[in-house]
Image: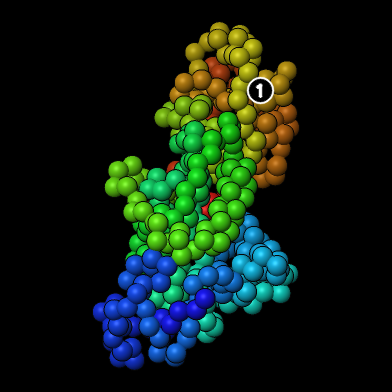
Amino acid sequence: MWVLVRGCWGARAAGGGAGCRPRSRGRGVAGFAGFPGGEDDRGARVREKPPWRVLFFGTDQFAREALRALHAARENKGEGLIEKLEVVTVPSPSPKRLPVKQYAVQSQLPVYEWPDVGAGEYDVGVVASFGRLLSEALILKFPYGILNVHPSCLPRWRGPAPIIHTVLHGDRVTGVTIMQIRPKRFDVGPILKQETVPVPPKSTTKELEAVLSRLGADMLISVLKNLPESLSNGRQQPTEGVTHAPKISACASCIKWEEQTSEQILRLYRAIGNIIPLQTLWMDNTMKLLDLVEVDNSVLTDAKLTGQAVTPGSVIYHRQSQSLLVCCKDGWIGVQSVMLKKTLTATDFYNGYLHPWYQRNSQVQISQCRFQTLRLPTRTKQEKKIVAVQQCIK
């Protein structure tokens, strides 16, 4: 079935402007609030049921899974869900840095680089980890608006890094939300579909992203199969329980041994360790900690750990586990490899650095051999913003 819809397909201010005649107040399409019925300025007809013409906006691995599902649906002609699929991503010197672009090129899908969104006609837009605010003029180009696949249970963790903050804060439950995009603000639109899943114990951001990307892709296809009904049944987000998931700066990777517990440090490692290694200071040299592990209870009974006073940051080598043990606010963490000029196992670091230091300083207390908190410049221009692969940029 087709319905004639009036729409403004050119850029305009929110209140209207030159080049866009006033909209008539006819029947709305599929519950898309504020979108009137009638014929648009070009006489374009808008569909009330599949197959849909889709413009996809995305960048990372999480978004790639949603694009893969859309592409599979387009290739399945018998299903009749997707007729047209094109892609918008951000500029990058190499497609390998953008999983969405890489997949689109391999699949021979038309690709545009933001802010170019092409000049085609579409029924609905889909956003996943795009990281750009979309204007009202752009949103209004789509009769059914733009859907967002967001990897959290909104309104918890609005913003560009929801999966990172889920892991960082030790959430036990998370999920995916399919919502409608609204202009000017991220992640505030009506919820069309939301599903929850338990967070597997000790999950990393990368591992959790894989789980949520598959869930989000399945949910997206489900919504598109019943798009008009899904839009008409959308619900506003609760005003309570709002939390924000801002980008993580490089400063967050600097371990504060005196302030952070072993659990907090391990969560930090699971949250951002695959994006930027945790960092510390060793004898005035920056050291990256590459492989952090929990310390087994049997190790904690070692006389070296219980027989003398230690301070946060104190580091010793535990031969049986072949790990560096580092004291933090409430206990110890294990480090199995580091980078100091080059990558070293804990044993290599002990043989090349720790053992010689102990030989030169045989009379000093263990607490004097320690890691210290690295202080990075905090000016905005010097901060390195990190995005999860699944850090999911919105």
Q: State the residue in front, 281 or 256.
A: 256
Residue 243's place in the image compared with 217, above or below, is above
Q: Is residue 288 visible?
A: no
Color scheme of the displayed model? rainbow
Determine the image quadrant of residue 357: top right
The residue that appears at 67% across and 74% down in the rendered structure is: 109
Which residue is outermost to the front?
Answer: 1
Q: Is residue 72 visible?
A: yes
The residue that appears at 67% across and 65% down in the rendered structure is: 79
Could you say where residue 362 lies in the image, as x and y percent from the top left? 62, 17
Could you say where residue 328 lies in the image, as x and y percent from the top left? 49, 25
Q: State the residue in front, 196 or 313.
A: 196
The residue that appears at 54% across and 32% down in the rendered structure is: 266
Disc 1 marks a residue whose amino acid type is Tyr
The residue that appears at 36% across and 72% down in the rendered structure is: 28
Asked whether, in this view, residue 264 is left or right of residue 16, the answer is right
